Image (tube, rainbow, N blue to C red):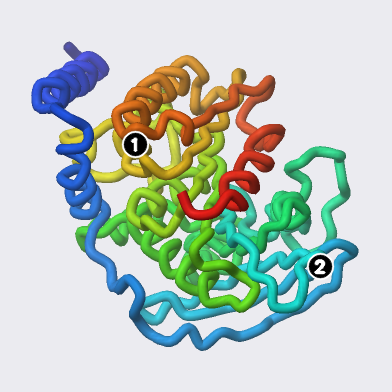
Amino acid sequence: MVKPDGYLERIYDELQRRREEESGSWKDGRDRLLEKLKQALGEFEYSPGGGEPFEPVLLERVELEEAVRERVEFATFGGLRMPAYVMIPKALKPGERAPGVLLWHGHGYGSRSVVGLQEDGSPRPATGKLSDNIALELARRGLVVIAPEVVGFGDRKLERDLVKEPTIGNSCYNLSVSLLMTGRTTAGLRAYEAMRAADYLASRPEVDAERLGNIGHSGGGTVASLSAALDSRIKASVVGIYGNTYRGSILAMRHCLCNYIPGILQHAEMPDLLGLIAPRALFIEAGIGDPIFPANTAREAVRQLKEIYAEMEAADRFESDFFEGKHEVSGRKSFEWLAAALKGGPS
């Protein structure tokens, strides 16, 4: 065996057999798996319900026809500060509290990409797609939306990357290798910062803290799924063009280093981690022609998730949509589903 492909496949097979042999009741093993996930992600300074003051700063406020768009910045932990856009529906009555949604962008130029702006902050020409301005589409459905700048993208790239490679798209690689050397992961940092963003969103006067949801696509799906697994306040989640098996997607081709969680296959495959969201509501969105999160293994993930939700007596809280498209945002069913799930109250 000169090339190591077969060696890797054997390891994957052995780990899958071991997981199957050790698996029992999903309910009985759920808490143990959650602890294993936390260990694999690494330790971070996040303190649920506590931590340092937000010290929020309003950077910008823009009146749109149907919503108000704010650009804010607040403290997360460890000295980090997170810029974010907040989209507030103008239809909201004085004193009314609406469901709040955390909107996670994927790989690209950051949070501006999900609020209808180009990289330089100017308005992006409309194409007629729901993905033109995801935050506004959700606000039109009566949701208060926060779209944070995920660490490593946009305004949150590493300074050293900007100095050495001014045109670099993101800092995922250098951030990931640096954190790995300290026993931490980029996935973990983003997931825990997401929980801190949920703390901030819940503190907003327009938001009903009992009705929080999240939505993310591609790399944003990583953040949405992991943070929802860790944070029981998230009542409904949309995970788009990401839900799959690791073996069929992340391990089958070159992906960004930020996707990898050391040792996780010893304990779980991706559907198992997505299953940690159960019995809370979950929607999987997948493109039939997606070349990097293939539909065939996405369907296998959906099959496994249906079994988990059935065991958790929550089959009616899981849905999926396979749309005609590639690695792109659809929203044709998921946006309405998310609004309905959150407006129905806590689940």
Residue, disc 2: 90
With respect to residue 115, does 341 lie above or below? above
Q: Residue at x 86, y 39 (%)?
A: 128
With respect to residue 281, does 327 lie above or below? above
Circle 2 sits in a helix, a strand or a loop, which is it? loop
Most foreground residue, 335 or 151: 335
Q: Residue at x 37, y 44 (%)?
A: 277
Specify the quadrant of the image occupied by residue 301. top left
* Residue 156 pos. (x, y %): 53, 67
**Label placed on residue 275:** 1
The answer to whether residue 190 is visible is yes
**Label placed on residue 29:** none
Callout 2, which amino acid? Lys
With respect to residue 326, does 27 lie above or below? below
The answer to whether residue 176 is visible is no
Circle 1 sits in a helix, a strand or a loop, which is it? helix
Q: Is residue 292 left or right of residue 108?
A: left
